[in-house]
Image (spheres, coloured by chain):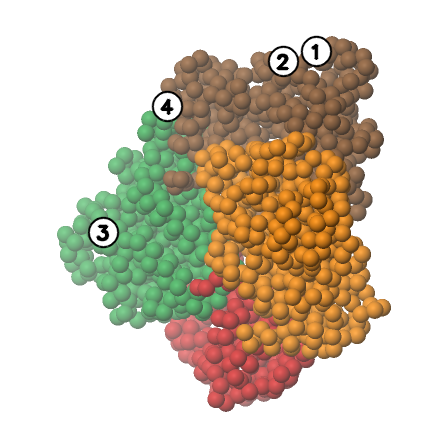
Chain colours: A brown, B orange, C green, D red
Amino acid sequence: MPFRSGIHFLQLPGPTNVPERILRAMSKPTIDHRGPEFKEFGAKILKELKDVFQASEYVFVYPASGSGSWESGLVNTLSAGDKVLRFDAGFFSEMWGLVATRLGLEVQVAPWDWRLPVDPAALVKLLTADPNHEIKAVLIVHNETATGVVTDIPAIRRAMDDVGHPALLMVDAVSSACAMEYRHDDWGVDVTICGSQKGFMLPPGLSFCAVSSKALEVHRSTKGFRSYWDWTDQMTFEETGYFPYTPATNLLYGLEEALKMLREEGLQNTHARHARLGEATRRAVEAWGLQNFCSDPSAVSAAATSVLMPEGTDANLVRTICLEKFDMSLGGGLGRLNGEVFRIGHLGDVNDLMISGTLCGVEMALSIAGVPHQSGGVGAALEFLASQ
Amino acid sequence: MPFRSGIHFLQLPGPTNVPERILRAMSKPTIDHRGPEFKEFGAKILKELKDVFQASEYVFVYPASGSGSWESGLVNTLSAGDKVLRFDAGFFSEMWGLVATRLGLEVQVAPWDWRLPVDPAALVKLLTADPNHEIKAVLIVHNETATGVVTDIPAIRRAMDDVGHPALLMVDAVSSACAMEYRHDDWGVDVTICGSQKGFMLPPGLSFCAVSSKALEVHRSTKGFRSYWDWTDQMTFEETGYFPYTPATNLLYGLEEALKMLREEGLQNTHARHARLGEATRRAVEAWGLQNFCSDPSAVSAAATSVLMPEGTDANLVRTICLEKFDMSLGGGLGRLNGEVFRIGHLGDVNDLMISGTLCGVEMALSIAGVPHQSGGVGAALEFLASQ
Amino acid sequence: MPFRSGIHFLQLPGPTNVPERILRAMSKPTIDHRGPEFKEFGAKILKELKDVFQASEYVFVYPASGSGSWESGLVNTLSAGDKVLRFDAGFFSEMWGLVATRLGLEVQVAPWDWRLPVDPAALVKLLTADPNHEIKAVLIVHNETATGVVTDIPAIRRAMDDVGHPALLMVDAVSSACAMEYRHDDWGVDVTICGSQKGFMLPPGLSFCAVSSKALEVHRSTKGFRSYWDWTDQMTFEETGYFPYTPATNLLYGLEEALKMLREEGLQNTHARHARLGEATRRAVEAWGLQNFCSDPSAVSAAATSVLMPEGTDANLVRTICLEKFDMSLGGGLGRLNGEVFRIGHLGDVNDLMISGTLCGVEMALSIAGVPHQSGGVGAALEFLASQ
Amino acid sequence: MPFRSGIHFLQLPGPTNVPERILRAMSKPTIDHRGPEFKEFGAKILKELKDVFQASEYVFVYPASGSGSWESGLVNTLSAGDKVLRFDAGFFSEMWGLVATRLGLEVQVAPWDWRLPVDPAALVKLLTADPNHEIKAVLIVHNETATGVVTDIPAIRRAMDDVGHPALLMVDAVSSACAMEYRHDDWGVDVTICGSQKGFMLPPGLSFCAVSSKALEVHRSTKGFRSYWDWTDQMTFEETGYFPYTPATNLLYGLEEALKMLREEGLQNTHARHARLGEATRRAVEAWGLQNFCSDPSAVSAAATSVLMPEGTDANLVRTICLEKFDMSLGGGLGRLNGEVFRIGHLGDVNDLMISGTLCGVEMALSIAGVPHQSGGVGAALEFLASQ
């Protein structure tokens, strides 16, 4: 790699820029995870993590990628042959479905427009068409990281309640947690899936799974082949302060610091900051005359914005210029969106000048790539940021 | 916790003392695991990791605990109802069996003496009694972390070959890798299981799985419900430099540094150092008039020594004194050995004076605890260390 | 302090943003500075440091601030009552003169315009008026950190040579080293003064002093009261690899890494990068309709730009807004310039997007502060950066 | 250098083992030392530092080696030609005298036995012989780092008071501070000299100078050539929170953490820990049949022990073996003691097992070097440590 001066702009929708406080916390010496010091430390983290998800039952913490918790949610509550419902609403919805299929579940896929949030009315219709309650779980991605479209989870819950369907509601909050409001208990979510490398500002390697009492009940009565992900084992952590197997101690040190930072900022302030940076980004996109891939203005994301390229232009060229000339990583179009969108992450440990510098990089790359656009995107963002 | 000066002596058989070089390497900024820099980095690690295991096919790296690779090995080559054979040779043998049972496998348990290595002759007898080859895999722990007993893997392989039994040979090398010679290919191992927090000197959070071409063949023809652990996905890493899902980037930075350190020392020198520290420890134990739990002198461990307590004394009291008075963590007796042994780790980033200080701590704790013993254990160790 | 997300923009003309590579290097364990490992390490640093200053004799490294080397240069070559000449060309020129006065030297001050570089012709005139060579040293600041004005050192040397004046030429390169070309030997400088916290990208705490053979000769024949700064002692470092007293070991680890980074980038590339960032900054200032405090376009600085405020506006208000609203530190007006200028550092470990973000912050702060200016500064900078 | 596993045993009487907490604190990003955050931070450190020295007036903090404060104390209170008194009581006493000589002071040297503390009665005699009060300052090293001999400072003060001599009392507490009781105010010390790399557990690079109101008075009336060390400038730090020149910010981060650790342990506990480790070391030395260089049992040091070698043996051989075979740095004999003693540091961030490991290394090195000695040194130390 050529020599690079200064800070790399890691403006992905994850992994996000890890604050140096967290990096330093992670460099503390590893301790005995069976000793009294860890016991106290583990119990503290668990309690604080519940506050973030607003989940009063359990939040399980796995040494794993976020995708591990997809598997955890599925194998703990479902048996091979069970049916789950997902909407074709984005790449991560697709991937989640693939995991379910591989684990032997039957996946009912409702066709959907990737540019729109899942419509509760559509869900009502699908659940109504399932009088025998064959659908055991509804899988919804809160913030589709691939599209920057946010689905209204409380409305989804109401839809399920309205038709009185007993399926579990499983929500992927991987890229929404910390960036926008999320209330596991109040919203009636049964299983919340999350990872460490986005709003939590940590490196990848930890996977979170918050569960409702209903999900636990289902778990207890579900036979299935599971060991690493088994919730019953994980519950011992809360009771004893010890993990069922060796935890990723140093990543947990980072988590402890992340939770401290979230408390210091105040979750509502964290959400407001993300909303602010998202708005600045969208103003720039609009001023450039480009389109937000999310076509529903009420469903735009505080975590990431997917920018749809004009016909005949290549999103990956913009990304390559950003990386090679300006040392900035943007997200690419995933799956069928490859080359058609690039994604700007405004998620995690980001502030006004970082997002300003980011938009400057994008504006320059658009010019260099010869993408037809209006100038003034950065100006529009600055005007917004200066005025608030 | 009370204030503690100086260095904590983490003399467990894992997690082990993480060198500051590795801790610092882990504190580098997280990068895009889909970018070109990671690609090069990932490919390099993978190659070097093969050298350590002496495995020419694949070594898979999971963001997971070591126990994750137990699951990986089983779900990728076996189907529910398949039979595996294990010996009742220690706590981790037991745990591995439990994982297999939970995953729906039938586990045949051969009774064994925890103080002895698995005898190839016993295996021959068991395999001979299986003319229909119902046993699909033989599970052997190379170095039983709970007992400090080492089983001779090449002899196990010869036993299987001698009777021409086609079962896969799966070996848990979690606490032997790097501490003693290990040759995945040459020894004919099909699946090697390992973790990061022992001989690799890393914090926990990475899980390794080395596989043979035979294991891969079996994998390809084995239907089963697996996603997170699926080898076919993992193989793309080697081919593309990219993980199938988000890898634990910062732990991989640590792994890169660990592999660098292992090369700098030279694997044979690393083994010799462990052998030396193990011998010093055993000389101290013998001089104290205590027993090594391992009752076969040809099967003693270079990684850890389990010390059997005299009747009527409590191993945990010795450990508590070491922790509270001398800020040293020793391993406890696991499972049925609780209270009966304590375990001294001499594994990982340890040197002569660290093991000397460790033995000093044990000698003082034995006195304080009133455990009947001869003085002179430290002296015997020093005499050995000074003479070599 | 309120909670701050993301990276602080430390856009001072020093201390500058310390790269994480250097921060990590500094966190290595302290070693014995009298042992063989240090000897090798010290010798290596010294050699590489000479390359940076392009100085073939000695570069002394003090555990001290940059101002320590002012004192070092003076006490090693001059005796109380000796006369030195300085131009009234900026705040640091003033401070250097103050140090000289306190050390008992007679300081002849040539009046000068702070907005202009020192004119060699003026120096010729002053030296011609000193036929008895009472002036023992000429003190010139290469890049006046307080004004962003660069004096042409080779031209100064030629002026001295032209009149055949034997005074020593002492140059303060504190904020120019690494940011722009500097050739101690070729330019005929006798004493070069420098510190660690600017172009060297290090935290403060190291002070550098490069000397010519002529300066060493003068040193040897100069009686004076000196101990900590004594060059004769320092010379033993080069010969033995050991410092005359305890060195700042961990800052030296940082220096080792900084020298490595400078080699990796290539000094000429480092200079070109600074020139580029300086040009971008000046284009923004010009587009805003504000004045560069440096009124000679051929003397503008690659390290820092001082922006002169319109009448009736307060530079410190702009700085306060930058700090409190945008978490960015700018330099203030020093001495008589307090409130009249603010200074943008584009020095050290800075890249395109960092300077872009910086200029965004300034543009927003100008608006918020109600400073009369044209919009478009950022746009002009981006246009330049994208086009190169 | 050959590859080294595990922790280096840095058992010098300075620099001492820097705790990882401090190393990590030092790796925080450098901030603007003229900004509001630093102001608060600087003021806090200064206050806490006074508590450690028990000094109510000023403690100045220089970016410098400890030897810088020798110079600071001298140039701020004395003028060229003034007389100071020192005892020939060790290497650092010698060096301090050399600094004074170089700074133009007249140094009266009282012959003394390096193996003994300075006797107040001898001082009485010398001061009585100075009826005109030509001696302006008495220079005493509290704990002679080179010999491990401690002089009783309150008794020295009483001696000066008894004869009513107005000389300033300057005390070098470089290796005693934090390791043993020290009371700047109560003991009537006028100038206390200290550095960062011993009891403060920091890397080298900070120099401390605590002063009495009498010293400040003398300072104000003393003309002299001084700039970097000038106390009047330094006093502005306390008043404004800002240093007169750029401070060593990252070392100050380390100091903040060190002060926190000292508070957490409690200064009296810190002293007791050092006393304990010193006693263990001396018991080992005695059991080996070797001599403590300090021949007065009431003057032994809690910071370091100098071990006198039997005739015909070479201390440096023992040190070389410790370094090369056991990766442990011991102190060598300084000046006239070169080869005759080696020094064991038991100072700073050290605990029972570290000192045990240290003594094991020494015992093995004595054997390997063929130094005539009794075995059992380690045993005697362990017996003591286990019994307390």
Tell me the subunit letter for badge 2. Answer: A
Determine the residue positioned at 30% across, 61% down.
Answer: C58
Marked residue chain, label 4: A
Say which element carries label 1. helix
User: Which amino acid does the dot numbered 3 rest on?
Assistant: Trp
- Res. C187 mark: 3
Closer to viewer: mark 4 or mark 1: 1
Q: Residues within 10 Å of mark 4 (few under 14, many from 20)?
A: some
Who is closer to the viewer here, C383 or A259?
A259
Q: CA distance from mark 1 to mark 3?
A: 78 Å
In whole angstroms, how far apart are the C-alphas of marks 2 and 1?
10 Å
Q: Which residue is mark 2?
A: A112
Disc on the earlier residue, 2 or 4: 2
Circle 2/circle 1 CB separation < 8 Å: yes
Q: Is residue C87 visible?
A: no
Q: Any mark on residue A122, and which?
A: 1
